[in-house]
Image (tube, rainbow, N blue to C red):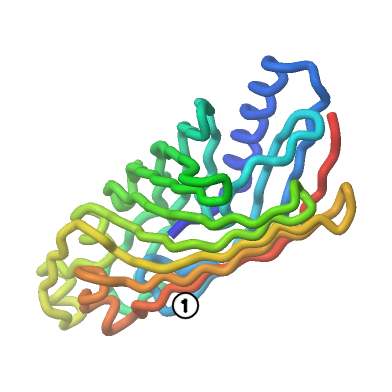
Amino acid sequence: MQNKSLAAAAVLLGLLSSASFAQQTKEPRRVRIGLGAQVTPSYPGADEVQFGPYINVDIARGDTPFGFEAQDESFAIPVINTNGVSIGPSLNIQGSRTNSDVGAPIGKVKTTVEAGGFVTAYAASNLRLRAELRRGLGGHDGFVGEVSADLIARDDDAYVFSIGPRVVLSNARYQRAYFGVTPAQRTATGLPLYRPGGGVQSVGGTAGLTYQFSRSWGVMTYARYDRLVSDAADSPVVRQFGSRNQFSGGLGLTYTFTR
């Protein structure tokens, strides 16, 4: 599950991207900043959601439409753009999980900074494919990735609607952090021992919309559903204290200005 709630990182990376554009061209730049609220699962496998900020920054030159970005993606900057293929770094923040969040002494997973990279390619003018892989720095210390496709309908920047499937994959270290049960946790909770492996963690889909009310003001929104599968779905932690059904969504206003 993706999380754009790290405002400072979003602003910093947006400024870095802006500086890059400034070096490439002297055309006026249009900047669109979106701010709102979103709900995401309290932790992977949770049956409750948490509220957080919903932030997005886009930059374009002159009258060029803003590049497409799915509303549920992690924060990313395209460094290489060639022949419809984009490659660059990505960043996500996965919030902590505490015993009070679960309602049982199942063990804490610290807040995790996930850093990695992504690649996107257009199979058709209105069909974008994306793959991403990130490594947890602290916290779960695992690898998590996502493969997605988005069917896009747009009228330049007047509106952009997208819909498509999502598949989340993670390695054994990630899944054991959130879905496993160690001997100590078995003693504390009475749950059976569980040592999940890696693989597909969830499958689902997302729909998103960006709509301009005027040249300056607009709205951004998305809704996403994920269903835990395989080892994640069979976890005693999920069955006893969480849910296989994972929901997220956001709503915010956008403001566009020219520099």
Residue 211 coordinates in the image, percent (x, y): 76, 58
Q: In this image, 214 relative to 188: left or right?
A: right
Q: Is residue 123 above or below residue 36?
A: above
Taking the image as shown, residue 124 lies to the left or right of residue 56, namely left
**What amino acid does circle 1 point to?**
Glu
Q: Quadrant of residue 107?
A: bottom left
Q: Position of residue 66 (x, y in %)?
A: 70, 41
The quarter of the image holding the N terminus is: bottom left
Name the residue rendered at 20%, 67% in the picture: 180
Which residue in the protein does label 1 denote? 48
Horizontal and vertical percent position of residue 227 = 37, 73
Q: Which residue is situated farthest in the front direction here?
A: 124
Q: Secondary structure at mark 1?
A: loop
Along the horizontal axis of the image, is 174 left or right of 5? left
Within 10 Å of disc 1 (Cα), the crowding (few <14, some 14-19, many 20+) is some
Q: Could you tell me residue 48's position as x and y percent?
A: 47, 77
